[in-house]
C-alpha cells in the first residue's frame, strides 16, 4: 500500500486543483494500491487531524476549477513553534498525524512560507515534496509558479477594460496589481495591457517623473494615462526609510497604495483621476491553459518523486524544463525582479515610464 497525504497552504490561486489532479492521476495510473488523504485547510488539517480519504472520483472534473478542493489557510512559519490556542504543539502534532495515517509521503502546494514549513517537516523526518504555487511568481529556484499566468491574464483584462473609460473621459487611472513584495504580475500585465506607467517595488518612483509622463501624454493629445501600480509600489523617499519606519507607515494606511498615489497626483495636478483595484479576482476563476499544463507537469513530477522515493525537493521550472530543486535551497527566499532585466529595458526603450 502506498499512502500519500496532500495539502494546499497559503493564499489560493488558479491551477492548485490541476496540480493535485496531476499527482493523483499519475499515482493511480502507476499503482493500484494507492490511498490518498487530503488535509483540510492547509497545515491546520495536519495539526488538528482533519482530513478526508480521497478517491479517483474526487480528482475528476477539477482541472478547470479555481481555488482548492482541500481548502487552505496561512500558518506562518515564524509561529510554527508557538502552540495553538488549544495548547497543541504544531510540529509534533503534524508528525503524529502523518505517523497515525502511516503516510509514505506528503505533497504540499504552497508559496515561500509554506515551503519553509515543508522543509522543516522534511528535516524532522517526513517525506515531503513541494509544488510551486502562487500568483506572485516570487518563489526562489523556479522561473514560474502556477497561478502567475492566470493572474497576468486577469490583471491585463482589467487594464484593457479600463482603457475605454480612461480614453472616453480623458482620465488618469491608477490600477493596483497584486504581487505582494515583488513586481512580476504588474510588469507583465502592465506591458500586456499597454500601461503608460508601471510602478514596481523593485524600482522606487518619484511623483515628478510620473506627473511628467502624464503631462507629456496630455501635451501630445492622448488625454488619458494608465498607471499600473504594484500593491508594493514604493516612492524613492519611502525606499530610504528604515524597514521598521516603512512598516509602520504601511500599517497606518487606511486604504491601499493606489489611493495614496491618486491623492498625491490630484493634489499636485488637479487632474481628474480614478483608482481601480482588481484585488482577489486576480487569484480567482479558472486557470488559463498555460497554468493547467504547467500545474499538471508539476503534479506528475511530484508523483514520480513519490514513486521513486525521492523527497525534500520542490518541483521547479528552469528554462521551461521541469526539474527538482532541494527545498532547503529555496525555502523562504524571495525571487525579486531584476530592475535591469531585458523586459524592463525593452519597456523603457519603447517609452514606458517606471516613474524613476
Ligand atoms: O500571495 C498571493 C497574494 O494574493 C498577494 O498577491 C497578496 O499580497 C496577498 O496574497 C493577499 O493576501 P490575502 O488573501 O490574505 O488578503
Image (cartoon, helix red, strand yellow):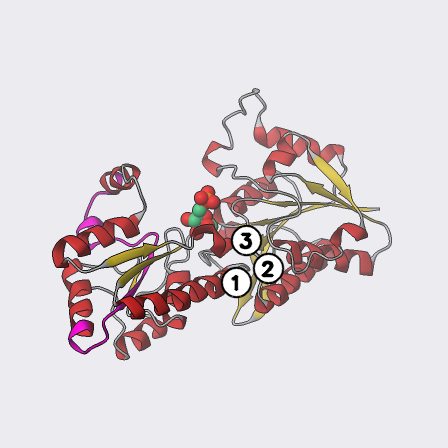
Q: Which residue is painted at 81% across and 60% down in the image? A: 29
Name the residue that disc number 3 marks: 13
Q: Which residue is painted at 57% across and 25% down in the image? A: 89
Q: Residues within 10 Å of mark 3 (few under 14, many from 20)?
A: many
Q: Residue 248: which quarter of the image?
A: top left
User: Residue 11: x, y in percent?
Assistant: 51, 46
User: Residue 22: x, y in percent?
Assistant: 70, 59
Question: On the picture, is 276 further left or further right than 216?
Answer: right
Say whether disc 1 or disc 2 marks the residue closer to the N-terminus.
1
Name the residue that disc number 1 marks: 150
Name the residue that disc number 2 marks: 286
Q: Whole-Å distance between the Cαs marked 1 and 3?
A: 9 Å
Q: Residues within 10 Å of mark 1 (few under 14, many from 20)?
A: many
Instruction: Tell me, yes or no, whether the highlighted magenta stretch contains residue 242.
Output: yes
Q: Is residue 79 above or below residue 151?
A: above
Q: Which residue is painted at 40% across and 69% down in the image? A: 160
Q: Are marks 1 and 3 in contact (CB under 8 Å)?
A: yes
Any atom of ligand 1 within 8 Å of the CB at mark 3?
yes
Amino acid at each position: 500500500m502506498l499512502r500519500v497525504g496532500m495539502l494546499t497552504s497559503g493564499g489560493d490561486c488558479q491551477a492548485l486543483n490541476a496540480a493535485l489532479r496531476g499527482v493523483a492521476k499519475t499515482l493511480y495510473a502507476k499503482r493500484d494500491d494507492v490511498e490518498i488523504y487530503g488535509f483540510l485547510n492547509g497545515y491546520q488539517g495536519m495539526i488538528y487531524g482533519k482530513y478526508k480519504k480521497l478517491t479517483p472520483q474526487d480528482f475528476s472534473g477539477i482541472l478547470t476549477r479555481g481555488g482548492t478542493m482541500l481548502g487552505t489557510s496561512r500558518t506562518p512559519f515564524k509561529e510554527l513553534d508557538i502552540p495553538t490556542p488549544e495548547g497543541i504543539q504544531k510540529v509534533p502534532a503534524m508528525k503524529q498525524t502523518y505517523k497515525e495515517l502511516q503516510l509514505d509521503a506528503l505533497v504540499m502546494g504552497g508559496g515561500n512560507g509554506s515551503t519553509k514549513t515543508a522543509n522543516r517537516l522534511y528535516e524532522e523526518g517526513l517525506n515531503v515534496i513541494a509544488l510551486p504555487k502562487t500568483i506572485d511568481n516570487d518563489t526562489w529556484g523556479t522561473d514560474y509558479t502556477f497561478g502567475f499566468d492566470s493572474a497576468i491574464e486577469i490583471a491585463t483584462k482589467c487594464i484593457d477594460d479600463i482603457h475605454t473609460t480612461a480614453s472616453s473621459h480623458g482620465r488618469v487611472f491608477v490600477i493596483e496589481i497584486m504581487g505582494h513584495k515583488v513586481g512580476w504580475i504588474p510588469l507583465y500585465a502592465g506591458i500586456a495591457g499597454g500601461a503608460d506607467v508601471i510602478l514596481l517595488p523593485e524600482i522606487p518612483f518619484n511623483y515628478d517623473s510620473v506627473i511628467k509622463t502624464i503631462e507629456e501624454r496630455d501635451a501630445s493629445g492622448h488625454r488619458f494615462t494608465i498607471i499600473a501600480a504594484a500593491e508594493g509600489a514604493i516612492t524613492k523617499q519611502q525606499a530610504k526609510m528604515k524597514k521598521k519606519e516603512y512598516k509602520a507607515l504601511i500599517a497606518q494606511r487606511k486604504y491601499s497604495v493606489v489611493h495614496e498615489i491618486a491623492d498625491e497626483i490630484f493634489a499636485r495636478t488637479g487632474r481628474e483621476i480614478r483608482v481601480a483595484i482588481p484585488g482577489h479576482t486576480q487569484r480567482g476563476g479558472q486557470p488559463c491553459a498555460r497554468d493547467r499544463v504547467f500545474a499538471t507537469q508539476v503534479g506528475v513530477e511530484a508523483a514520480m518523486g513519490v514513486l521513486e522515493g525521492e523527497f525534500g525537493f520542490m518541483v521547479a521550472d528552469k528554462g521551461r524544463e521541469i526539474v527538482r530543486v532541494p527545498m532547503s535551497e529555496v525555502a523562504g527566499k524571495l525571487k525579486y525582479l531584476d530592475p535591469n532585466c531585458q523586459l524592463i529595458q525593452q519597456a523603457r526603450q519603447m517609452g514606458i515610464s517606471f516613474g524613476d
